[in-house]
Amino acid sequence: MHESGPQPESDDPKQLYRGEYAKLYLERTLSSTYSEIKNNILANIADRFGVRRVLDLGSNVHGSVEVEGSLKFQMSKRGIDYIGLDLAFEYFDRQFLMEQGVLKDKIYPKIKGIVGDILLLPVKSDSMEMVTCNDVLEHTNDPSKALSEIYRILKKEGVALVVLPSLYKLDMANFIHIEERRKSSHLEKTTVDEWIQRGKENGFGIDEESSLSIGIASGLSYLAWMDEKFIPERKELSTPETNSTESLILKEARKVFIKYNDEIDIKIRTGRIDDMLLEALTKGNIKEVFQILDQAVPGLVSMEERRVLDSFFSELDIISFKPDRIAEIQKIFRNSRYPKLLLGSSVLLVLKKLDKNI
């Protein structure tokens, strides 16, 4: 649901999956660079764990539409059986999908789907070896209950792959000025450390080695949202957003970052640039963060894309962010036990089911 995903038209969860929302998700999100990168990572991890079946909670159309960005596509490439679960039947219904413009030959001939609520899963206890739950928990009104349900249905030593927002729209800080300017569909906004703690409270252990941040450059670009001018304004979920000159500059820059997210992530990790970024963040030096990011990009982008990024970085160079907002970001990074997991737009947490009796 991250990275240019459509916005809901209704506060009723089941209504999110119908009409314009479904059409926009199919057109924009399913085949987005973010979806392809994320689902490739998830499938690689599932394959590394040697699982042969995965249940995807909040699956949307990922088990119904045959495109490279879908999770079923990536899992099937690795010989892993995929089952989707979502609130609405429509996402498993061929007629509905064709009404949204999906070509018949792009719909899987055999769709494995379960209609159900993540807060009360219609799945047997101790029955699944792996569960995926991607960009979903932040949309629920009781994430702890959802985690307890995931724990219940996993087999002994089962694994949950959970993708959550980190720097995405600065959910980690839950700034009032952002909420006042832009209505969010996220019901839960908190830090990666707090998400991990909730997992532990529900019987999970964190596999730090396998967990990772996703989209470091696109995530760090959201630090610009510490200044109101960079935030597209939207007072209600059902109303279109209005953009300032600065928010449009950021939007164009983010398109470039998202396009090269995978390459930039690899470069930042292998070049130890993540350590430099974390040092600047713990010092509260946001300008240095953007300078480091600027230097990490050359060689990857076209001349036109370079001009887009130059415009973005030049705009940031003249901005003075409010000290209390910088201090909040600084505190989050300073206090984190898992600072490298905070760096991305999203974080993939690999949670292992532990024996509660030990």
Image (cartoon, rainbow, N blue to C red):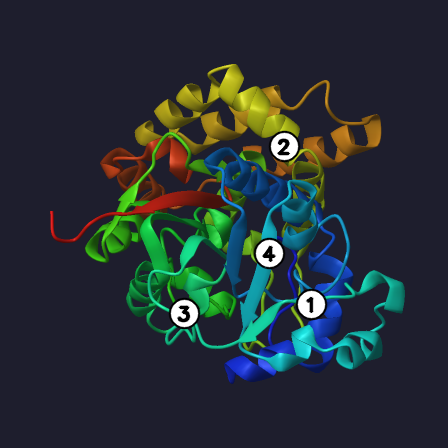
Q: Amino acid at mark 2?
A: Asp
Residues under labels 3 and 1: Cα distance? 30 Å
Residue identifier under label 4 = 82
Residue 126, x across and y down, in percent: 34, 60
Residue identifier under label 1 = 111
Instruction: Classify residue 74 as left or right of residue 220.
Output: right
Residues under labels 2 and 1: Cα distance? 30 Å
- Dividing the picture into quadrants, the one containing residue 193 is top left
Residues under labels 3 and 4: Cα distance? 28 Å
Q: Tell me the SS state at disc 3.
A: loop
Instruction: Classify residue 159 as left or right of residue 25.
Output: left
Residue identifier under label 3 = 187
Residue 280, x across and y down, in percent: 39, 25
Q: Is residue 69 above or below residue 181?
A: above
The tag earlier along the polypeptide, 3 or 2, is 3
Residue identifier under label 2 = 262
Residues under labels 3 and 2: Cα distance? 28 Å
